[in-house]
Amino acid sequence: MDFILQGTAQALELLFSGDPETYSAVAATLTVSSYAMAASLAMGIPLGFALGHLEFAGKRQMRLVVDTLLSLPTVFIGLLVYAFVSRQGPLGEMGLLFTLPGIAMGQTILALPIVIALSATAIENTDAGLRTTLLSLGAGRRHLVTGTLWEARHAILAAALTAYGRVMTEVGISMMVGGNIKWHTRTITTAIALETGKGQFATGIALGLVLLAIAFGVNAGVSFLRRK
Amino acid sequence: MKIQFTACKAVFLGACILMLMCRPGWTANPDLLMATTTSTDNTGLLDYLAPHFTEATGIEIKWTATGTGKALELGKRCDVDVLLVHAPDAEKQYVADGYGINRQPIMYNDFVVIGPKSDPADIRGKTTKAALDAIQASGSRFVSRGDDSGTHKKEIALWRAAGLTRPDKASWYIQTGQGMLPSINIAAEQSGYILTDRGTYIKYAHDKGGSPPLVIVVEGGDMLRNQYSVIQVSPENCPDVKADQARAFSGWMAGKQAQQLIDGFRLLDKKLFISNADQ
């Protein structure tokens, strides 16, 4: 038990003493999660909008597929991505194995279903009268889209934050695709796994708290941006 | 007020983006990717050697620590440039199969069986064969890596040499599927016996302040020798491999400086590895 207290003290020490190993892991975590979020939002919001707004044959089945993909295990994604980016895999030429962009690729696959499913729900839940109102105001197709998205912005932001939480905390993809290479692909979560494995529980707890501190920072930032 | 606040937001957002873009890029040094066993990483040996290697050659080395089985597989698939592993039989086969070249012995230590001080199976000082017999007969807990690592391969060989079938499904036989230090920690929690290389055990004892709950009960004998070697991934099998840097690493590890550094790497006043490139 004592390692929890010890870890808390160590977390503060790591953060304020500018421990280079910790900051390297923090930078790796922030970099991959930013890449992954940018990619999954760029693809996921339009797809989520289509899924929530449009009527088309097979929509329910499509929804079922997306909802199922919410359960994709991270180690399985890691294995899939490894198969593709290994030098003998179809994307082997790009040299993505053991790199941050490689990890980001896997995390994008992890985040995409979350962004799609939750933003589709957000669009579906916009006021039923919104479409009529927008049309009666003489909105064209483009305004209908932007108007609906604007109306659902808070729910979409919540979707993004949910996906961000999942991406930042996953360990399976980072471990399998990144290889936990010190100074390069060691993220906070793979560092926690390593320290715990080595029996350095206090360091593991400290890194966990560092991760939470970052999550707090991101959420505080978003909350600041949302203020009217 | 309203406009000021919006401007404030814009500045904040801009600063966030700038911060992300300005993170240090990749180093310009030619780098080398190695797959290695968990013992060389867990003990801290590589952290200790890497800066000296970079200083001597200008090559930056990156490594991923995994079991020897997976390390060999990564080399076979051309995902790494060089290997530092410890399963001589599997390595010789690997080189014979054309996946690796220039197997260079670097250092050795030995395997030891460690267990609780109370020694429930009463194996202290016995031969490995007698010890495994006694463990099986008494049904005392035994922790196995179970991950196709060099240590796991050695353990399987020991059961076979003792003329016993490996107790795959026995309730007292615990297969962790994890690295060396994690497995030792599991053995300590379970009060079980475990086979480990001496280097990792010394590191474990050091982490426990010199008085670990698990102590060495069986040691010695040719069967327990643990040889580490560097193997370069074959450029014929993998044309893109960084063959020059891999050769430089192999040569440096076998050279005088690295060999002396390895012998100087001590914890609790004990050598974790003993250099033997010249043999």
Image (spheres, coloured by chain):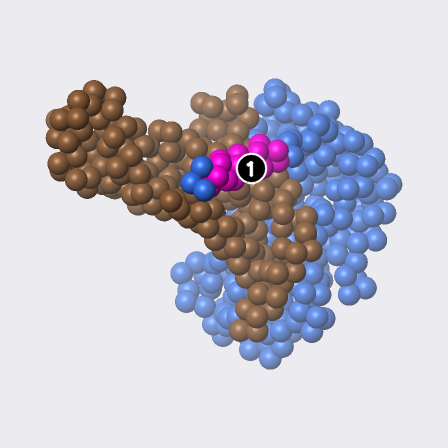
Per the rendering, the colour in which chain B appears is blue
Q: Which amino acid type corresponds to the residue marked 1 in the rendered image?
A: Ala
Tally of numbered discs = 1
Q: Which type of secondary structure does the marked residue at label 1 adopt?
A: helix
Asked which quadrant contains residue B220, the reply is bottom right
Which residue sits at x=57%, y=28%?
A: B78
Left or right: where does residue B205 sit relative to residue B192?
A: right
Query: Where is mark 1, residue-wise?
Result: B15
Pick the residue in front: A92 or A57: A57
Q: Quadrant of residue B210?
A: bottom right
Estimate the x, y position of residue A37 in percent, counting from the top left: 43, 36
Which of A23/B105 is in front? A23
> Is residue A71 in view?
yes
Q: Which residues are magenta?
A: B4-23
Q: Position of residue A81 (x, y in %)?
A: 44, 33
Question: In this image, B140 relative to A6: left or right?
Answer: left
Magenta: main secondary structure: helix
Q: Indicate the chain on which mark 1 is placed.
A: B
Q: Residue at x 22, y 40 (%)?
A: A121
Residue farthest to the bottom, as pictured: B118
Residue lying at 71% horizontally and 27% vertically, measured from the top left: B28
Q: Position of residue A30 (x, y in %)?
A: 53, 42
Identify the colour of chain A in the image.
Answer: brown
Based on the picture, tell me whether residue B237 belongs to the magenta stretch. Answer: no
Q: Residues within 10 Å of mark 1 (few under 14, many from 20)?
A: few
Task: Residue B18: say if magenta.
Answer: yes
Farthest residue to the front: give it: B1
| Residue B138 placement (x, y as % from top left) | 49, 74
Q: Nearer the viewer, residue B9 or B74?
A: B9
Q: Which residue corresponds to the image point at 57% horizontal and 73% vertical from the top-left?
A: A2
**Vertical side of B8 occupied by A86: above or below:** above
